[in-house]
Amino acid sequence: MCAKGERIPAQSTRPQDDYQIPKVLYTDGQVQVAYWGYGHQSPLVTVTPDLESQRFVFRTEVNCQPWQGSFQIIYPVNLGEVCIRASALVPARSPFVAF
C-alpha cells in the first residue's frame, strides 16, 4: 500500500543472495473492502474507511515476464459490487509513480 504520488522503485529480477536483502517484498494478500456487523449496535454493512485514498501495488507475471503496477479501490455503490481502477502497469525493471 502506498500514498498517491509516491514513487515506486524498479525491482530487481535477478536471484537474491544472502548479502542483499530486498527493501520491497511482495506477498499474497487481500484487501478488506467491507465488513458485516451483527447485533443491534452495528450497521449491517460497513465500508472500510479511507479506502479511496489508498493505492495498492502489485507484481505479476505475463508470458514469464515480471510486471508491477498499482490500483485503487472505489467505494462500492451497490452492495456486492466493487470497482477497481488500475493506475499503472510497467515492466518490473521500470520505476513508476502511483496515481
Image: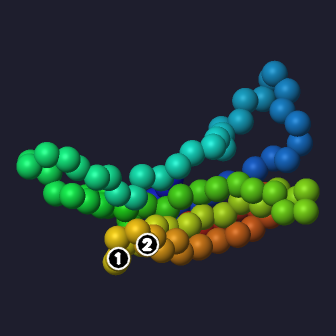
Vertical side of 17 occupied by 48: above or below: below
Alpha-carbon span between mark 2 and mark 1:
6 Å
Residue type at numbered disc 2: Glu
The image quarter in which residue 95 lies: bottom right
Q: Does 10 sit left or right of 53 as displayed?
A: right
In what element is the residue under mark 1? loop
Q: Which residue is mark 1?
A: 78
Q: Residue at 25% of width from left, 58% of height from top?
A: 46
- Type of residue at label 1? Asn
- Decide if residue 99 is in sight here: no
Residue density around tag 2, few if under 14, some if 14–19, many if 20 or more, within 10 Å:
few
Q: Is residue 20 left or right of residue 29?
A: right
Residue situated in front as seen by the camera: 69 or 17: 69
Using the rendered view, name the quadrant where residue 79 is placed: bottom left
Residue 86 makes an appearance in the image: yes
The residue that appears at 40% across and 58% down in the rendered structure is: 33
Q: Residue furthest bottom?
A: 77
Asked whether the beta carbons under mark 2 and mark 1 sit within 8 Å of each other, the answer is: yes
Question: Callout 1: 10 Å neighbours few (<14), some, many (20+)?
Answer: few
Which residue reaches farthest left?
40
Left or right of 1: which side holds 16?
right
In percent of width and height, residue 29 lies at 57, 45
Give the residue drawn at x 53%, y 58%: 56
Residue 53 placed where, x, y %?
38, 65
Left or right, residue 53 beside residue 58: left
Which residue position is annotated with label 2? 81
Seen at 85% across and 47% down, the residue is 13
Image: 59 above or below 84:
above
